[in-house]
Image (tube, rainbow, N blue to C red):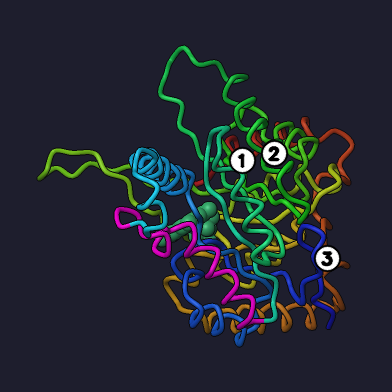
């Protein structure tokens, strides 16, 4: 059985990638994931705000001490402990993880604006990251901000990050665009080698005791897979990039549906958080059994087999399927 696939120009032994989460923040858990068969890991994100905070702390320190006397110029910083910077830790972590495992290690930057933080992409590459994932999550709260301005902000950030690296760049996309397919196309034009469909927004809730709004990390179920399947099917073979299915992949069946819709790989977070690293082995067993039973010999053979590439008029197909589903509902 040939489970080999590609992700962002990297060859993977199978389509299972560990998505950014607390599970990809420790060497122990990454080693367990590798031992259970995961094909690549995406590290938990380094956030723009963390980098900027540290840049500002360093600026502040350097300015404060620029008036010090020459005799004092060699003394070591006390206000800022350079060894304790979150971003420097992240870089050291990449080096340690790269030395500890043999699967591809993908760094993750999470930010929204054009600024000095994007230069960190170079450092992540130098630390040995095999690829970089960029997660741009921006919630426009101004009612005057038009969609094209938001889109341009995303594209400018991708262009800037691309300019700082030569390793593959994967964009983890939000679903919240008027036309996600066109946005994916423009991300590729801006330099993306891979698109992940989709990032999952945090869950907004209200604490009725504290009378305050709060956001929680969103643990999904297979029921969240729907939009991922829809857009993988629409985008299959439409762009010169790989597609990674994310949000709602929990089982071998979910993986098979995603690959048949057009995904090259799948990224998992919730299922690994809730069931543990061993679940990778169960998913791999489930897909190989299913493939044997249905006489498939490779992942390549299944890719995109139920995508919209085989449909003459995809828009009409989508509309007809939508109407049919609503008109034929039976209790
Ligand atoms: C607790 C938790 C932490 C996460 N941390 C990150 C992160 O640091 N960076 C990121 O891009 N996505 C992060 N995510 C999102 C996941 O990588 C993934 O995109 C999302 O959970 C959807 O996949 P799933 O359905 O397999 O959970 C996190 C998700 C959870 C649940």
Q: Quadrant of residue 132?
A: bottom right
Mark 3: few/some/many CA within 10 Å (<14, 14-19, 20+): some
Q: Which residue is mark 2?
A: 321
- SS at mark 2? helix
Pointer 2 and pointer 1: residues touching (CB < 8 Å)? yes
Q: Which residue is mark 3?
A: 302
Q: Nearer the viewer, residue 217 or 290?
A: 217
| 178 in relation to 259, above or below | above
Q: Quadrant of residue 95?
A: bottom right
Q: Return the x and y of residue 87 as percentages of the image width and height.
A: 48, 57
Q: Return the x and y of residue 8 as percentages of the image width and height.
A: 77, 57
Task: Give the residue at x 78% y 82%.
Answer: 293
| 231 in relation to 248, above or below | above
| 20 in relation to 330, above or below | below
Pointer 3 and pointer 2: residues touching (CB < 8 Å)? no
Q: Which residue is mark 1?
A: 325
């Amino acid at each position: 059985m040939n489970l080999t696939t590609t992700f962002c120009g990297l060859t993977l032994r199978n389509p299972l990638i560990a998505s950014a989460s607390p599970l990809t923040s420790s060497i122990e858990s990454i080693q367990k994931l590798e031992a259970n068969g995961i094909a690549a890991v995406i590290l938990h994100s380094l956030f723009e705000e963390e980098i900027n905070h540290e840049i500002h702390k360093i600026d502040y320190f350097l300015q404060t001490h620029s008036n010090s006397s020459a005799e004092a110029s060699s003394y070591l910083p006390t206000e800022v402990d350079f060894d304790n910077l979150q971003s420097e830790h992240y870089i050291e972590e990449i080096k340690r993880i790269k030395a500890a495992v043999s699967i591809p290690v993908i760094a993750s930057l999470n930010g929204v604006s054009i600024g000095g933080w994007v230069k960190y992409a170079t450092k992540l590459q130098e630390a040995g990251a095999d690829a970089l994932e960029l997660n741009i999550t921006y919630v426009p709260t101004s009612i005057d901000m038009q969609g094209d301005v938001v889109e341009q902000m995303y594209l400018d950030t991708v262009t800037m990050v691309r300019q700082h690296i030569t390793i593959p760049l994967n964009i983890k996309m939000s679903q919240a665009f008027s036309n996600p397919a066109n946005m994916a196309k423009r991300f590729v034009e801006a330099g993306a080698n891979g698109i992940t469909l989709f990032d999952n927004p945090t869950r907004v809730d209200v604490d009725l005791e504290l009378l305050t709004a709060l956001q929680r990390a969103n643990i999904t179920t297979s029921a969240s897979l729907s939009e991922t399947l829809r857009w993988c099917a629409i985008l299959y073979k439409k762009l010169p990039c790989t597609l990674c299915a994310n949000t709602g992949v929990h089982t071998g069946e979910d993986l098979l549906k995603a690959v048949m819709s057009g995904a090259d790989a799948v990224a998992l977070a919730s299922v690994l958080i809730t069931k543990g690293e061993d679940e990778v082995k169960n998913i791999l067993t489930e897909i190989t059994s299913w493939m044997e039973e249905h006489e498939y010999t490779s992942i390549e053979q299944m890719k995109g087999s139920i995508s919209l590439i085989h449909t003459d008029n995809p828009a009409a197909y989508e509309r007809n399927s939508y109407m049919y589903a609503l008109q034929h509902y039976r209790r």
